[in-house]
Image (tube, rainbow, N blue to C red):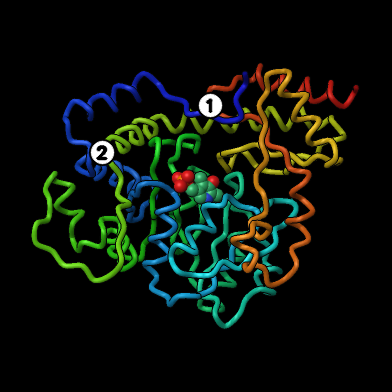
Amino acid sequence: MIRLSKSCISQKDKLAVKRILDTEFLGMGPETKKFESKLEKFFGRKVICTANGTSALQIALQSLGYKNGTEVLVPSITYLASYQAITAAGYRPISCDINLNSGNICLESINKNYSKKTKIIMPVHFVGDPVGLKKIYSFARKNKLRVIEDAAHAFGSNLGNKKIGSFGDISCFSFDGIKNITSAEGGAIVSNDEEIIKKARDLRTLGIIGDSINRYQKKRTWSFQVKEQGWRYHMSDLNAALGISQFERFSKISKKRQSLAKKYDNCLREIKEIKIFKRNYNQIVPHIYPVILKNPESRKEIMEFLKEKEIETGIHYYPNHLLSYFKKSIRNKLPNAEKIFPSLLTLPLHPDLSIKDVKYICLNIRKFYKK
Ligand SMILES: *Cc1c(COP(=O)(O)O)cnc(C)c1O
């Protein structure tokens, strides 16, 4: 079976994890500190590692300290985690429409959904492509809004000559099992805002003030103070060791993801029943490879056909405003999100996939339409 996505683990990754197991210290300690330091060098900014990407978003949101019910503008087409993080922080997601060419939040919809209660915009770099981000930052500056980038797909991607996470307000990353680099479970908050970083650092250790500094040295804090709701959202050294090992071979991983996506583009360009997203894979590191089916009615059938050929496919993402828990997130109609959703199909993409696999997948897509 050609899997849609998978964790790709090297011999070195396994040894890195084993080395931590052998220390018999699996909590947050020096390895997590080391991972943070490496990421700080990579981004040129402060980094806080967390249990996963969802918790990174949640405590980044909470760190901003707005009152309950504060509105966060977020695209409807995103992983459910973006939405759950917003409500977990006590805020209200407001669903925005997307740009059909990129799948990213669209500025017109931001304008339409903006209200007096809006304090935050959460753009999601769909696939890892931050296109349109500059305009969002200028809107945010003009209206004094904060921006939390859900950069879960975008580790290693660039906007112009700048790395995502190296500029802007706050960026949150995910290192879950199938993301651009993995720590099995893990996430990171990246920012230059010292106050936010300081707050987030305490929130991840149950709100215990200054606890991280002790934990980095394998120490506990026995006498402490707490000022607000905190969470058990720190990263374990076991996860950090895997994250570091993956990070050290990221240039190889990213090149592989980029070359596979380029190969898909080349092979699929001739299939007229399929529309491909126009993206610059020299600039971005793709986390997934979705395409648009010109005939959405064929989606179920093509998914089954490919499954018979041992090719797993997926759908990214179901519009969040259509989920009953989030139906109140809608203020205006979202025609693009509803239009694009039925025609989205995601093809396999992970570093263990070969160019030959991509050719085989495309060949079978062509076969399906020739039937
Ligand atoms: C993966 C992902 C997250 C959440 O990250 P986890 O590490 O799985 O908690 C958030 N947003 C998007 C768009 C994601 O793809």
Q: Is residue 158 visible?
A: no
What residue is at 64 percent from the left and 20 percent from the top? 355
Quarter of the C terminus within the rendering: top right
Amino acid tagged 2: Asp
**Is 16 left, or right, of 81 in this rendering?**
left
Tag in front: 1 or 2: 2
Q: Quadrant of the rendered structure where residue 221 is?
A: bottom left
Residue at image mark 2:
237
* Along the viewing direction, whichever of 247 and 219 lies nearer the viewer: 219
Q: Residue 208, relative to residue 142: is it above or below? A: above
Residue 120: x and y in percent read: 51, 70
**Is 322 left, or right, of 12 in this rendering?**
right
Q: Is residue 189 visible?
A: yes
What residue is at 26 percent from the left and 58 percent from the top? 206
* Along the viewing direction, whichever of 156 and 314 lies nearer the viewer: 314
Residue 90: x and y in percent read: 45, 69
- Ligand 1 is within 8 Å of the C-beta of the residue at disc 2: no
First in sequence, mark 1 or 2: give its number: 2
Residue at image mark 1:
351
**Helix, strand or loop at mark 2:** helix
**Farthest residue toward the front?**
324
Amino acid tagged 1: Pro
Q: Residues within 10 Å of mark 1 (few under 14, many from 20)?
A: many
**Farthest residue toward the right?**
371
Residue 318: x and y in percent read: 67, 49
Would you say the residues marked 1 and 2 are in contact, meaning their CB atoms lie under 8 Å apart? no
What residue is at 43 percent from the left and 54 percent from the top? 166
